[in-house]
Amino acid sequence: MTSSTTPRTVTEETITDVAVERWATAHDPRTAELLTSLVRHLHAFARETALTEAEWMAAIQWLTRTGQISNDKREEFILTSDVLGLSMLVVQQNNRLREGATPATVLGPFFIDDSPELGFGGDMSDGVEGTPLYVHGVVRSLDGTPIAGAPMDVWQADAEGAYESQLDVDEARLRAKYRSRDDGSYCLRTIAPKGYAIPMDGPVGELIHQTDISWMRPAHVHFWLAVPGYEPLITHLFQEGAEYLGTDVVYGVKEELIVRFVERDPGPTPDGGSSDVPWLEAEYDFVLQVAS
């Protein structure tokens, strides 16, 4: 290693090797691997595109604005990762589940922790206008064994495509936590979601407006199941026939996650109750893989 007091001429040809050498001194081996690879790829990108100083400064300013617009309710950096396809790539690399297990998809930028707990069939829409939707099924393992007490975070956009974090509200809205019963069954009541545009008033929107990329997401409900002894599952259920299934801006749609929303007349509902108005029914079993 070159002494800190020994002059060393750094050229366009040698700077990558010098920077890699320095970052390879990271005390944690994995950190050293990540940072040296990052340096190599960033430098290769700059060389391949003949990056100009003006373009480099524009990128720095874009990153600065992305940080400035982010807060505890809006994660513009997650949104950046989502629209570049990086989020889904990381999800798929880290969730190579066996055939038959429910596939994972992106977390998205709108998850809020500490949702209220509701019982079987509890209504997380709580007066929010929209067509009633009952989602029910069983949480089970790959061998068919029902999983009792499985915690399930659920959240979604409203009938106008807005999440709680995008609205000026103080109470939980269209989000809740449920648990499967002893036989693995679960049931929740909500409203039919709507396809929506990702936030387009920030740096991510600026980029997308320069392309022909659709900024819409198809109608879906988010789920997060974290059951001890099983691989955690973050996923969506998408409405069959929804617009934008083929052009989801965050690349999150998987065929196994598309579910039919069946129209039902007023009458008995899956929670053992009854509805005075027409409602929708979606039935889906979440299949979890034992943790490796």
Image: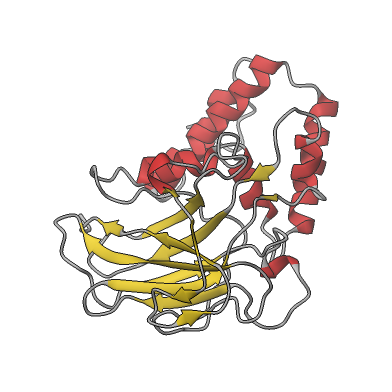
Q: Residue at x 62, y 39 (%)?
A: 244
Where does residue 12 sit, x and y in percent of width and height? 67, 17
Q: Residue at x 54, y 54 (%)?
A: 220
75 or 48, which is in the foreground?
75
What is the tally of numbered marks visible in this picture?
0
Q: Is residue 98 left or right of residue 110?
A: left
Q: Is residue 173 left or right of residue 144?
A: right
Q: Is residue 68 left or right of residue 257?
A: right
Q: Find residue 48 and report its image quarter.
A: top right
Q: Residue at x 43, y 64 (%)?
A: 224
84 or 142, which is in the foreground?
142
Residue 18: tell me if it is visible: no
Q: Find residue 233 and report its image quarter.
A: bottom left
Looking at the image, residue 217 lies above or below residue 164: above
Q: Quadrant of the C terminus?
A: bottom left
Q: Find residue 232 and report its image quarter.
A: bottom left
Looking at the image, residue 135 lies above or below residue 93: below
Where does residue 5 sit, x and y in percent of width and height? 61, 36
**Residue at the right extreme, as displayed:** 54
Where does residue 221 sit, x and y in percent of width and height? 52, 59
Residue 139: tell me if it is visible: yes
Q: Residue at x 74, y 28 (%)?
A: 212
Looking at the image, residue 35 lies above or below residue 68: above
Judging from the image, the colouring scheme is secondary structure
Looking at the image, residue 164 lies above or below residue 239: below
1 or 69, which is in the foreground?
69
Where does residue 50 sit, x and y in percent of width and height? 72, 16
